[in-house]
Image (cartoon, rainbow, N blue to C red):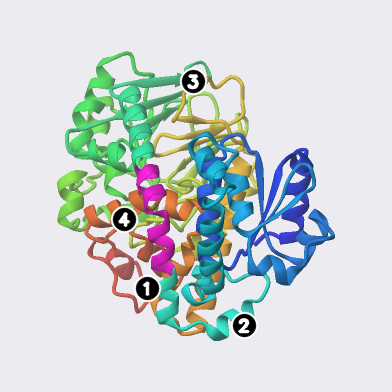
Amino acid sequence: MRDLTAELVEKLDSKNATACYRVLYDGQCEICQACVAWLKTLDADNKTICLPITADALTEVDSRLKMEDCLRQLHVVTPAGEIRVGWDAVACLARLFPSTWLIGVLGARFPFRNLGRLIYGFVARNRYVLSKCRGGACRVARPETVRRQARLGAFWSCYTLGFFIRLPLVMWAGVTTATQRLSVFSRTYHRRLELLNGKLTILFLDGMLPNAVPVLFGELFTTIIYDGVAVDPGSPKMRRSLAHHLRQTTPKITKIIATHAHEEHVGNLNWLSNATGAPIYVSEMTSQFLRPFKKLPWVRSLIIGQPPDLRPPFQLLKQTVETLSTYLQVIATPGHCDDHVVLYDPKEKVLLAGDAFMGSYFATPNPDVDSRKWLVSLERVLELNIEILVEGHGHIHTLRKDIPDFPGVVIRQDPKAAISEKLDYLRWLREQIEAGFQEHLPTRVVEATCFPWGRRTSWESCATDECIRLLSLGHFSRTELVRSFVRTNRDPLPTVYEARMSAGE
Ligand SMILES: [Zn+2]
């Protein structure tokens, strides 16, 4: 968790802060948090800075502000240095944006001003009753008092209230991301991306039912060819599109590697080996998972396809693997699943990450994710000098100019910064979950505290996350994210990964 004071100083320094409206809100209050989420959505031009109330924040912003007053109602400091309070602060903010301007103007005049003050006063007086637990975000001002008062009933009323206040935002975010996903899918459909003068080729794979995944959830299916090594050749249901790519001028394939034994990565190992004559390389654990490949749950088997068992000949990966012009380091990165490995080119500073990264924010893991192991693996990966991070599901994180722009695929972000961000997120989750279980909270409550509505990602990805839960029949879900931190050997293991037990864990 970042130091709040540091964050505050950064926020106030980040731009000419006094030229902005500084909004002081109760960071513990679900209603205040919801209003801030709305405000941030409206405020595309960054006219406001929202600051949760702390003693530091108040002195930093304006010495006239008093903690008790600020906790009682909303305070806004205008660029001119005026302090607006309560309903007048709301009306003042509303006037900043075209869609709410009229409310702001009318709200400052009789009789709307009086009516507004009356309603605002009622909500402000009762918000502590409505919102006692603050969705697990009790980190500022008076956490002890709040925790003491909080009962689970209050928690759920507060959490549900937070959800309903944001429902239009949740739905809007769902529609927007769905549109973006459709656009990325159509732009990558049947395509290949040749980068680094042909050293790195991304083949985008598709298949009738597998296409539902990129469209609904944004995970693209790819095979990566790096310096003669084909990585993760897709599932049986993507075989036709892989064959289509092979008929085009595909770079020479001299080796085939699977990063881990998930169905969308390993279904065509033998097929591609027969088609190209290239030998197969997998880690020892992956080979165990693939022989035999356990029966998938029917939804996954229907949509992605049940991979065939791996047939010999195949070779076991060692610490390095030769490529056409150089070599790749093979690094074990358990977490996403126990057998995961990543491939790293130290000369070009390229990391072929498979599923070992999956974006800085990822909330719906498989039942075989172990987030504690994932944390350790990512800490190790962070020690590498990475300039280009290539994910197994079609995203490339890089700042390098020799990788051309491709919106939705190439993400202009320092790969190490992206990994650090994910590490911060995983550590924060670990803290939340450990605290939750120490307090003997039920899993459902712990899950909710990991997605406080005050966090933008919680409501922004809510529609997608719940859609994934529904369509995968609970296989990929926010609940699994919680379970991924508390896995023990006593956990009932999902059918696919029973192999783990036979592997002697
Ligand atoms: Zn995977």
Q: How far apart are marks 2 and 3 (CA)?
A: 57 Å
Q: How far apart are marks 4 and 3 (CA)?
A: 35 Å
Q: Which amino acid does label 3 sit on?
A: Leu
Does the magenta stretch mainly form a helix, a strand or a loop? helix
Q: What residue type is labelled 1?
A: Arg
Could you say whether the residue bearing mark 3 is in a helix, strand or loop? strand
Query: Which comes before the other along the chain, label 3 or label 1?
Result: 3
Query: Which comes before the other along the chain, label 1 or label 2?
Result: 2
Q: Residue 195 carries which label?
A: 3
Q: How far apart are marks 3 and 1 (CA)?
A: 45 Å
Q: Nearer the viewer, residue 494 or 87?
A: 87
Residue 449, given in percent of the width and then of the height, sits at: 48, 69
Q: Which mark is residue 444?
A: 1
**Quarter of image, res 269:** top left
Q: Is mark 3 within 8 Å of ligand 1?
A: no
Could you say whether the residue bearing mark 1 is in a helix, strand or loop? helix
Residues shaded magenta: 159-174
Label 2 vs label 3, nearer the camera: 2
Q: Residue at x 24, y 42 (%)?
A: 267
Residue 369 appears in the picture as rendered: no
Residue 166 drawn in magenta: yes
Query: Which comes before the other along the chain, label 4 or label 1?
Result: 1
Residue 72 drawn in magenta: no
